[in-house]
Amino acid sequence: MTTASLRLSRDDRPILIAALFVLVILVAGTVYTVSRFGSAPLLSPNYLLQQLQVGSFLGIVSAGMMIVILIAQIDLSVPWTLAAAAMMATSVGGPLAIPVGLGVGLLVGLVNGIGVAYLRVPSMIFTLGMNAVMGGLMVAHTGGYAPQTAATALMQTLASGRTLGIPNALFVWAAVSALVAVILRRTPLGRYIYAIGNKEAAAYLAGVDTRRVTVICFVLCALAASLAGVLLAGYSTKAYQGMGDAYLLPSIAAVVIGGTNILGGRGRYLGTLIGVVLIVLLNSVLSIMDMPEAGRQVIYGLVIILMLLVYGRGERVTS
Amino acid sequence: MSGISKRYAGVRALEGVDFACERGNIHAVLGENGAGKSTLIKIIAGVVQPDTGGMRLGGSDVRFATPSAANAAGVVCVFQELSLLPDLSVADNISIASPPRRFGLIDARAQRRRAEALLAGIGCEDVNPLMRVRDLPLSRRQMVEIAKALGQRPQLLILDEATSALTSADVEKIYAVLARLKAEGVAILYISHRMHEVEALADRASVFRNGRHVETFDKGVRSTADIVQLMIGRDIAAQYPPKPAPRSAKPVLTLENLSWEKRLERISLRVGAGEIVGLGGLDGQGQKSLLLALFGVLRGVTGRVTVEDREVRPGSPAAAKSAGIALVPEDRKTEGLMLPMSISDNLAIASLDAISTGPFVDRAKERAAVERGIARLQIKIGAPGDAVSTLSGGNQQKVVLAKWLMTGPRIILLNDPTRGIDVGTKQELYRLMRELADQGAAILFYSTDYDELIGCCDRVAIMYDGRIVRELEGAELTETNIIASALNIDAATAPHAASGSAHA
Amino acid sequence: MLDDLAIRVRQNIGLATAVVLFCALYLVYNLAHPRGFSSAVLVQNSDEIFALAMLAMAQTVPVLMSGLDLSVGAVMTMVGCFASYLLTGTAGGTPIHLEIFGLHLNLGTFPGGIEGILLGMAVCVAIGTLAGFINGCIVVYGRIQPIIATLATGAVYVGIALFLRPTPGGKIDDDLNWAMTNSLGDFASTVHIFNDGAAPWFAPLAWIPVPFALLVLIALLVWVPFRRSVLGRSVYAVGSAEGAAYMSGLPIERAKIAAFALGGFFAGCGGLFLAIQTSSGNADIPQAGAYTLNSIASVVIGGTSLLGGSGSAIGSIFGAMILRVISFLFRIFDIAPLLQPLFEGLILLAAVSIGALGVLRVKNTLELFR
């Protein structure tokens, strides 16, 4: 997106504020740990790397979710797409494990895309239905228990191993990030995505194949979820029921905290990245503080509201 | 009103305006788009606040902070963009602001009776008050809007292009209503671009230009030519570029028996390279549908479309684009542009393939193409990175056209492109159209303005009821003939051109 | 007259379809059930339907304004946990103390006995309404989109619920539990009114399940008057065309806050009942999420458009009932429990895709983009 001015554009402000907030969390957390334990684990690279490693799963899911939110849609089928990919990958095992897992994502994304783009069912409700169907399929397939087969060695290495001291999962997240950022900023597809999110009718009349772009976006989102599922199964060495449920709302929150408009059409990937880091760090600090789940939820909700209030709110509708 | 001024983001919409209208008087407000009429009306109606100046209503000073405050004082406005709620019923809409109540809740029966009475008052008994506004045709919706305004018992009624979507029969009903209100002592402000309406109705008229009040005069004092001169402030001669001598051009676009639902019936037409062919006729005879059909927006179109000896079946705008067809759509704000996005992004969106190297968009090529587009159409902008919503209407339309020119089209379809555009930009667009035709493009041009059709087009196809009833060119291309064909009657028995039924 | 009827039916086709569908499904269910058409089955079904029906009503109001409330399940859970403290019904009342940040605060004693229960129920419903009111204020004054505002507040409310009940517990007065989850006759005899349920005029009504009666009462006494009020109509107006609503001078901000507050009220009622029914307070986060998502599905199945401006909470009630009856049917037809979630999902998907048939008939593709 071209901008000639040096002033802070509307898209950059939330990124800066989110980055600032990340610093605030780091500082506040360090103050706490120093005063309580006399140490600063938050500042230790090893600790941070480990936290980011766990955060990479959320990061990958959020990258996919951002794409769908940009075209003014939403994907509520992420939880069971993630879980199904994990379960199928561990069931199949062997060299086909990862391709099968990703294949699940491809399939789900295609169905979602067709339902939203061709049948014009509101994405909120169609993906909700898909989530239920995927959940049902997995329950039927696994008999309601966690599948006993373990994740393949490759999956485990990708998720838990390290290369040059840096967790492999981070490399995967970085690769996904690079791909998404490049698509959004440098390719025609990225332009079409922003155009559709702003005004689908105008994009359509400009000769953009809006249906195909929509399908591609849902496929990308589901692929991201399935990749995260495969990695998560590798990290936990097996798949388990409900493993994707904890990723839906935080991924949406990360995207929104990063400055992407929930109604679509604007937002930069850097923002989503920082949003994920913010949420992961917040989680870390809260667990260091031994905050019970109750407190975590409350703080999590309050942080989202606070940040949105600070970003500059929507316009009052006058005409 | 005295000394009213208003600025919008650096643009002076109104400058030191003094204005007055009286009871029992129909007062027309005339001026080009951008002259300040809409702003003046919005200030009177309480939608916006003036920066300076004051208003007096019936002798006392007033200041309306909201539309409801204005309504309470008896100032009611019927805007061009309808203020109806599409999903609610007619009865709900008419009594939306202060419905009849019983035990604190809305009395549906009383509301319905009220709606029936008001609709009958304007001659619209056929509208069932239970119907949802969304299910009514546009002309009926506008009548409901007017009934709603009358229900608020206005002392000052403002009609902002309120008759633009009405059928001629409905327009007559409205004239009758206005005459009745006049007799009752209501003051009426009437904004319209249709000179014959203004001539028929107005007792007094005021002309605005560039945010200033130019002149107010009584009925009959000024001729139409005088008025137009006041409105644009300069000689209107040579408004249209000269047309080339008629030549038999190779047909670039050929339509054979194009049909769609009941709206298009066996349309056959040829447009040659270098020709500007206009589509004329009364509103809603299929002209817009024809353009949409050619651009691939409509499903179930039958018939043959040939572009340069090759048959094409535009099944979507994307397919039409690759066949070399471009469409400048009807509503630039919702169909032609992505308003929050930058000028540069809007310009490039249709031709990203051409400015890409491999899978990536080539920034340098894009910048160059964008600059070329801006220069060619002389679009007045701040910077290419500005949002396109900051541009004036005329410049926005130029962006839409430039976007399409960047795709190198052979056939350019224009859907009422000069609606709501200032005169200066209009003339630039006319010149550009002729230039493009001279360079070999085939142009199909729909306009609701007969002058434009006569001035710009080599040939005009008049449509009636989904069919082309006549093609006029050369000496035959006159207003009389257009009107006669539009009404589908013989030219010899055509009504006088100045009658109120010339509805375009 | 007939013209009017035709118009009304056409405008409410979604609601009509839902009603017909529900009646058909429920008929099949009762026919197949060994003890179908009996009061006992009716009571059991009503108990299972009530909470979701309430949440469906709660979700309807923000959806009518083209928004969404992702916190309905959380509000329900939170109110349920409050109820597990306030409705114990012990004679001497319940001592209330607060343990927060290491401080131990004694807030006095909440009354017991009948007054305590009535007061407790009122307080619970008020808490739900307050939660909704807060949602509305954040959306209106914070100018944050409803979907993300309620996502955040939902987390807060769930946190409060967890704070109240880190593990499931608490107690609901046994009489209350019995009275509310059975038929009107049982209610009357427990509460000792209408001659303990034996009054002659009362007898024909005695078989009606209490939750069903409550549902009808709440719908009639709360929803219908709201819909006919200026505030209620403003909610529809905002969902239909917010700009036009502003131009017409409607109280937009008050309508939005009222809409969310009403949603909170319904969600609170649902939570209250759930606590009474299960006789405990359970801060079950997955359950809250499931209820929220099911409430959205109920709204859609009940014929309310996610785009706003048209629909009704009555339709959503039927939508919720359809969802529940489908799971009842699975039980009856002994569908393998492992396959039930799959079928539920497929049916949901099919139900919402039915609207797609209209899309295929559209001749001007521009109409597909609203």
Image (cartoon, coloured by chain):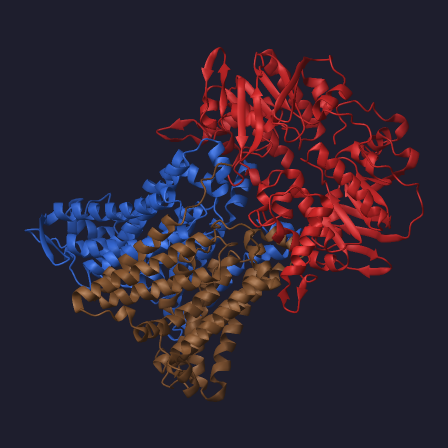
The N terminus of chain C, quarter of image = top right
Q: Position of residue B221 (x, y in %)?
A: 73, 12
Q: Chain A drawn in what color?
A: brown
Residue at the extreme left of the image, as rendered: C92
Q: Is residue B350 visible?
A: no
Q: Position of residue B77 (x, y in %)?
A: 55, 25
Quarter of the rendering containing residue C169: bottom left
Q: Is residue A40 visible?
A: yes
Going 52% across and 48% down the picture, which residue do you hit? C13
Q: C79 or B14: which is nearer to us?
A: B14
Q: Position of residue B349 (x, y in %)?
A: 64, 55
Rendered view: C234 above or below B224: below
Rendered view: C333 above or below A204: below
Q: B20 or A14: which is nearer to us?
A: A14
Relative placement, left or right, of A300 versus B181 is left
What number of labels is visible?
A: 0
Q: Which chain is red?
A: B
Going 46% across and 54% down the picture, which residue do you hit? A12
Rendered view: A135 above or below B260: below
Q: B94 or A308: which is nearer to us?
A: A308
Going 37% across and 40% down the picture, which residue do you hit? C224
Residue at the extreme front of the image, as rendered: A6
Q: Which chain is blue?
A: C
Residue at the extreme bottom of the image, as rendered: A94
Q: Position of residue C248 (x, y in %)?
A: 48, 31
